[in-house]
Image: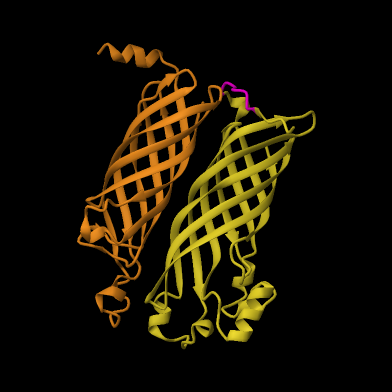
Amino acid sequence: MLLLTALVAQAADGALVRFGLDAGVETSTNDPFVNHHAARLGASFSPVPWVEIGVAGVVFPGQLLGPNSDLSPLGHRFSGEGFAAQNRVSVDISRPDWQAEAVLRIRVLTYPTVAWTFSMGGLGGAALTHTVDDPDALQVNDDDPRFLATARQVHPGPVAGVYWDATSGHWGVRVRAEWAGYVETIDSNVLETKQYAMLGGEVLLWF
Amino acid sequence: MLLWPAVALAEPVFHASTSIGWQCLPAFRPELSNTLGTAFVRVELGGGIERVQVVGVAESAIHQGDWAAVTDGRIRGDTRFTNVGLGARVPFAFGRLRLVPHADVGVDFADAPATYWFEGAIDNVGETLDDHTAGFWAQGGAEVGVTVVPDSVDLFVAGDAGVVLWSMVIDARVGLSARF
């Protein structure tokens, strides 16, 4: 039986305050057609072991390659490539290319061992997501003013999720499942609510 | 006047919480009834003493509806919200159970990015893109929680009612609260 014990309460003193950096990768798990692989760089402030305030920047390199990056290996998933080729349609016209987020993480369960400390918690906060529309997928001219008006947008939206981490001394690793949602406009006239379920992993450095 | 010595002697308490929930516009507003509601995330950071705390509150939300607009100061569909303000919390503890009445007041920033789609103003691209609205936000409610890490972390459910842009909203949420 996996034993998880509650984190023992500790007094908040200066010795508990930590700053951290993290770097990792992530991908979406709820889009069967388009890859949303991303790289992440973050920083955290932890006033006590059970609370972290984190900020992070995320880039989606497959989308930064250009508006036609859906044709690259980083674009469509296998099923999406076949779907698009057979039906001559794009499965996703507007895709994120970068994101900035700020979250609060609260640790609820900790299992310490001699070498490692395993724990899990919940997170919540907000993100700014920048999206780029694909004129070819939309079958419009890239100088169409209606297309251009909403081709690149920044969308505020909520993020929430759970995380598991293991730390040993200054180093650690974290696995994170996170939901991010936003509302966007495509071609100035189509309104879409997007929901991404991201799964990611990071290497942590605490000091 | 007698309160001030008590406050000065009390141990400071810091508070942080995050929660996720669903917010609805009541159906008794016919003009709003096509709105399904919104998923939202709320974050609180602040502190005070054990019995009274003042916190900064931020909420990020996306309303889902059949159509979009923030017109005449009213919420009408797919809309993005960011609420920021100040809240007051008054925690009560009953063993491991905690009851926390609270009230918030602040500003709501909302925008509906495609209003003109429904207004028949498709030729006015750019003019109607700037459909941003800022308005009054206030709500109150209570958290009911159970302490999962002694003296540190609570798991709670909460309900709130209030106004956003002069439209009444109600919400339910679940989250984690930390004190230190």
At 33% from the left and 40% from the top, the residue drawn is B160
- Magenta residues span A6-12
Quadrant of the image for the N terminus of chain A? Answer: top right
At 68% from the left and 54% from the top, the residue drawn is A24
Image x and y of residue B179, in percent? 49, 28
User: In the image, which lettered chain appears yellow?
Assistant: A
Q: Is residue B104 magenta?
A: no
Q: Is residue A117 visible?
A: yes
**Magenta-colored segment: predominant secondary structure:** loop
Give above or below for B71 relative to A42: below
Give above or below for A52 relative to B70: above
Q: Is residue B127 visible?
A: no
Q: Which residue ends up furthest to the right in the rendered image?
A: A115
Image x and y of residue A35, in percent? 63, 68
User: In the image, which lettered chain appears orange?
Assistant: B
Q: Is residue A9 magenta?
A: yes
Which of the pair B26/A171 is nearer the observer?
A: B26
Image x and y of residue A201, in percent? 68, 51
Looking at the image, residue A171 sits to the left or right of residue A192; the answer is: right
